[in-house]
Amino acid sequence: MTRATLRERLPILITASILALLTLAAGLQFEGFFTLRVLTNLIADNAFLGVVAIGLTFVILTGGIDLSVGSAVGCSSIMAASLVKNAHLHPLLALAIPLLFGIVLGAFHGVLIARYELPPFLVTLAGLFLCRGIALQISQESLQIDSPFFRGLTAWSLTLPAGASLTLPALVLLLVAALAIVAARQSSYGRAVYAIGGNAVSARLMGLPVSRTLVLTYMLSGFCAALGGAVFTLYTSSGNAISGTGLELDAIAAVVIGGTLLSGGYGSPFGTLIGIAILGVVQTAITFQGTLSSWWARILVGALLLAFLLVQKTIESLARRARTA
Amino acid sequence: MRRLPNWSWAGLVLVTILLFNLALTPGFFDLSLRDSRLYGSLVDVLNRAVPVGLLAIGMTLVIATGGVDLSVGAVMAVAGAVAAGLISRPAGTPFAGGSPSPALAAPVALLAALGCGLFNGVLIAVLEFQPIVATLLLMVAGRGIAQLLANGQIVTFTDPGFALLARGASFGLPNPIWIFVAAFAVFGLCLRWTALGLFVEATGSNPVAARYVGIDARAVRLTVYALSGLCAGLAGLLTAADIQAADANNAGLYLELDAILAVSVGGTALTGGRFSLFGSLIGALLMQTLTTTILTRGISPETTLVLKAMIVVAVCLLQAPKFRESVGNRFRRVPA
């Protein structure tokens, strides 16, 4: 590895070592932390957040932001539940329709942002209100899903050795993560995303389809948010309009902890996956500890975010000094 | 042709909603005087718009420098928790043990909020973090801190003097309205009579040029985030005084978004530069009038969210140069 690529990979290496240290500390502290079962539970428990954060990573890579993802999760979850319960649709169809809704929502964001150059922050803020409003219109109460087929879906899991198993939400996360990592690194779409995040003007001058890529990216994020909602519905076997409140922040935190710069152009879905793992390990460790109150998780996530940003800043300024020297 | 002010679209929508109410909502403009205090939908709109209005004052300055403050909702929760803790000294919280000190509640809570604002300011001005990220930190951790201060409970308290802040009335109008008027006047005068407003606009519209003319952008940024924290603290105090409780989870939840919407609908561009405090006030009033209209007409309150989203998109589109070009609008471009 040459020096340049080492420096390029430093943030992700630091994130990975923070994850390793945290896991090690938790493993030494608590008995039974280092089991396959804890790992698979960790994946399943954070599946919906992971799917959402991976979609968001692409938006952030273009230098944008999507604040609507949290309420899109709530909207998709209540929509699916209500389609099963009130419209008596087949569960698979009921889970698929919200995905379409997510894509349409994302396209709406993307067109406003790419075509009319409205700030992403504001457009997706409107999307946040829109989704939450629609979700609460559908139902304000939590809807339990009790179709036999759906029960089959939630109960199904891929059995692994040592009493561990991968449930459907966990598999969805792993699949989405794999696809995203390949798309970011190998596809022309991925290269366009990085180019736009690096410098949108040069990307346009290079002849890259900037507007199309932006619209596609917000559609991808909308789709991932809705998929996150579907996963959440599977995970809880119910739909709730207020689920996913504040999730956009956890997702942004995961992306940033994962080493993606909010200014765009630098980072990766793989980093986000590590970011999710860090959040998950903190959460799991707090559960294992038992006496710490849940708000410590929020404070710790904030502290981690701060620590990581400081590290990023230091690397940046060191790199700048190295370049000028 | 004289340039239309940036908030004209928001003003137009506000007037439209008011006219709609004049025609279709009986009693919306009724005012009655009881115990030398005015009651009515209009007073209610003003009173309820105060927290968002206060946040919008600070947010306007922050946005004018090209930044954004996502932490204001969490700072409100912190201020509320500090005030409630000092008044009722609940067991299990960091405030337990001492004697109740309602006199200290407001100043200490405001100081805590100012501290939060300064924390944001240091991260952004000195360490040069992106504003979204820096304030996101406190937005995530702030609610945790508020819950820590309240030991995870909703801290209730009874203190007639403190409650008067939000529930009392002077000169016929609820106290929060006067507090807002005072804050608005102080900020407005400081910004227009001193060079602060000019510095803020210069920092936001062109930081490099601002540095060349000798404006200390760091000091300006630090100041606006500190002031935004202070405004959020005041809003948090009023909210806590109103419900006589501090709810770390729900106090000010999503209010940062309302404040940002109020500011941007009011014509201050999110990219920074020119700002209008008055526009933000119109924006805050627009949001609250919409909410109150929906409530008084018996439409389900959830519709507010959908309508808010649509109005924001509509007003932003109308202000967007690209959209105006594409529809061939003959209005003069609003400077970004």
Image: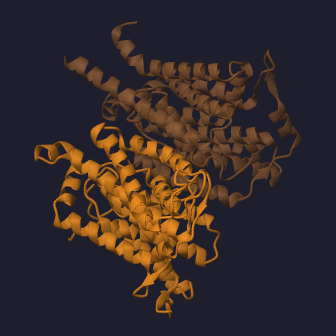
> Residue at horizontal 26%, vertical 63%?
B332
In front of the other: A31 or A283: A31
Where is residue A239 drawn, in percent x and y?
73, 48
> Residue at horizontal 51%, vertical 90%?
B30
Is A3 placed above or below A214 here? above
* Residue B4 visible in the displayed image: no
The chain letter corresponding to brown is A
* Residue A227 visible in the displayed image: yes
Q: Quadrant of the C terminus of chain A?
A: top left
| Coloration mode | by chain
Q: Based on the displayed image, in which of its 4 quarters is residue B201 positioned?
A: bottom left
The colour one sees for chain B in the rendered image is orange
Where is residue A283 drawn, in percent x and y?
62, 34
Q: Based on the displayed image, in which of its 4 quarters is residue B326 positioned?
A: bottom left
Where is residue A67 drawn, in percent x and y?
50, 46
> Residue at horizontal 86%, vertical 44%?
A147
In front of the other: A302 or A30: A30
